[in-house]
Image: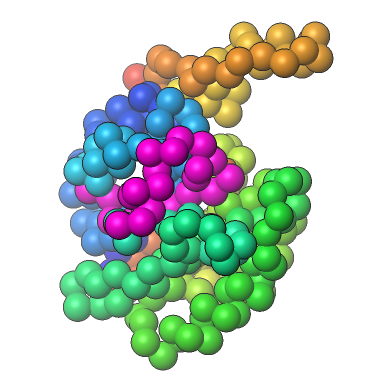
Amino acid sequence: MRFLLIGDVIGRTGRRAVSTLLPSIKKEYDVDFVVLNGENLAHGNGINQKVFNEVVSSGVDVITSGNHTFDKKEVLPILDTDPRLLRPANLPPMAKGRGFGVYEKNGKKILVINLMGRVFIGIPLDCPFRKFDDIYQEFKDKVDYIIVDFHGEATSEKQAFGFYVDGRATIVFGTHTHVQTSDERFLPKGTVFITDVGMTGPLDSVIGMRKDEIIQKFITGMPQKYEPAEGRFIFNALFFDAESGVIKRISILEQSGRI
Ligand SMILES: [Fe+2]
Ligand SMILES: [Fe+2]
């Protein structure tokens, strides 16, 4: 089974990167299963039916999310009806939607769990470590692979989580910071880990947003309206082949070829 994990996809430019590159990357790497974090798909924040359909039709199997899941109310009916969309599992139990799902591909069962860190996030959340334990206990003998999108700000929390689930999860990929880290590896007990897979979106931006407004915010201390940037994109992802054990971090800049 060959997996491709894509982090936060930002607005129109990020969607353009996905529709431009994902079909050929899937072909080149013979990818079986794609997970993509969609919290920033719709104009930089949130998810609606149009962008959900767009990304799914590019070849994505499961869309995870994070602190921006509910930014657009159009997400609610999708969360109600479509098991391919996940929100963090450690939100309060009364939250709409589901935080994990089991998906079948090539005769194998893949459990995808979406979790959110609690450090510097500012949302009341249950413990993601204990939430993983609960879900793992229920599904460990029923699935072939376990993939976790850990949506978090603090590198320390993501790394601690990776070691906590080492040997239990197949892959833990971090999302939310929008900047790719170069620490992809097998942890000692065999879990594939990356602290943050990075965003797919406008490269000449501050984590996906127009840089001018962000600079103004920093130099004046006054609130600004943030808009997603446009222009050349960066496509970031992590590939893992469970049979051969190959882990490959992918980072492609538009107009600049592969690095
Ligand atoms: Fe994000
Ligand atoms: Fe986020």
Task: Find residue 132 and report its horizontal and vertical position in percent.
Answer: 58, 74
For the C terminus, the quadrant is top left
Image side of residue 174 versus residue 242, left or right = right
Q: Image point 48% across, 17% down: which residue?
A: 229
Magenta part of the chain: 59-81
Q: Would residue 80 be counted in the magenta stretch?
A: yes
Q: Would residue 37 be counted in the magenta stretch?
A: no
User: Residue 124 sits in which quadrant?
Assistant: bottom right
Q: Image point 67% across, 65% down: which residue?
A: 126
* Residue furthest bottom as drawn: 141
Q: Image point 49% across, 21% down: which residue?
A: 228
User: Residue 116 sits in which quadrant?
Assistant: bottom right
User: Residue 143 sits in which quadrant?
Assistant: bottom left
Image side of residue 202 versus residue 224, left or right = left
Q: Nearer the viewer, residue 2 or 149?
A: 149
Q: Is residue 218 above or below residue 63?
A: above
